[in-house]
Amino acid sequence: MSFFLSKFLPLFVYPLGLAVTLLLLALYLLRRRRKRIATGLIMTAIFVLWIPSTAKFADTLLNSLERHYPPLSVERTETAGAIVVLGGHDAFDRLYQGIRLYRAKKSPLIIISGRGGVISDKKLMMQLLNELDVPESSLILESSSRNTRENGLNTATILKKMDLSRVILVTSAFHMKRALAVFASVGIEAIPAPTTSEQKLRSSELPLLDWLLSSRALEKSTFAIKEYIGLIAYRQLGWIE
């Protein structure tokens, strides 16, 4: 139930979900002849949807998470007992980063934790790994994790059996802060190896375009808002410090 609520309730806080909720409430009030309040809700819904759909807002919000973990070259990454690749958003980029680290001999083992994208398709993933000379003996698949906390708990169980405690953690730059905090809370020393930051949407030549609506900007804003909600929720639940 707690997993369902953690995935369902935030939908009403994300820009699109919140805007739709406000518009439905406004429609109800219009039918009840509460025109003034309904108008206010409609204007609020437009604002809630418009601002996160601009490149200016999306880039600023996502950069506030990504700037703490800039891309690090594979050569400069330290070695560890295992490379842990988290599933989820941009799963292919994460998997590719993990393979690059493996081929650079930063660790003899790759642990893939969770689901998402190419990671959810075991056959496709194994084909990709084989083509890139990653033997199955160097791979551990952990597909039961549904969120970042379970990634940490399930990975800790695997590492304990192998007497390992230090890993290279691969995830998106905007997700790295929460992932590192979770892994630290379960006793894992993690070296951050973020994937490339999201491409900036802002226009340097026509700043006015930064305030026009963009579906890509709304998607990026939603990623960032989701991550901030995750950080707050995990702290409130005592899962991270």
Image: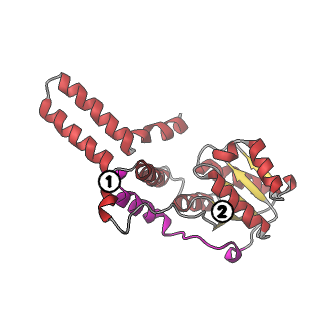
What span is colored magenta in the figure?
Answer: 51-78
Residue 72 forms part of the magenta stretch:
yes
Say which residue appears at 75% left-offset and 44% top-offset. 124
- The mark found on residue 111 in the picture is none
Q: Is residue 145 above or below residue 30?
A: below
From this viewpoint, is residue 150 visible?
A: yes
Residue 30 located within the stretch drawn in magenta: no
Q: Left or right: 236 with respect to 195?
A: left
| In this rendering, the label closer to the viewer, 1 or 2 | 1
* Residue type at tag 1: Leu
Between marks 1 and 2, how big is the CA–CA gap? 36 Å
Name the residue at 13% across, 30% down.
Answer: 35
Residue, disc 2: 169
Q: Is residue 12 above or below residue 87?
A: above
Q: Is residue 115 left or right of residue 232?
A: right
- Please, which residue is most extreme toward the front here? 205
Secondary structure of residue under mark 1: loop
Magenta part, dominant SS: helix
Residue 150 picture location, percent across and down = 63, 48
Q: Residue at x 76, y 62 (%)?
A: 82
Horizontal placement of 142 versus 56: left or right? Answer: right
Residue 165 appearing in the image: no
Instruction: Please give the name of the residue rendered at 75% of the width and 48% of the height, measured from the top-left corner.
Output: 125
Tell me the amino acid under the disc marked 2.
Leu
x and y percentages locating residue 10 in the rendered image = 43, 42
Up/down of 164 relative to 19, above or below: below
Picture coordinates of residue 196, whole percent (x, y): 58, 64
Q: Secondary structure at mark 2?
A: strand
The one nearer the camera, 212 or 226, is 212
In the rendered image, residue 209, in percent from the top left (x then y), is placed at 33, 59
Q: Which mark is residue 212?
A: 1
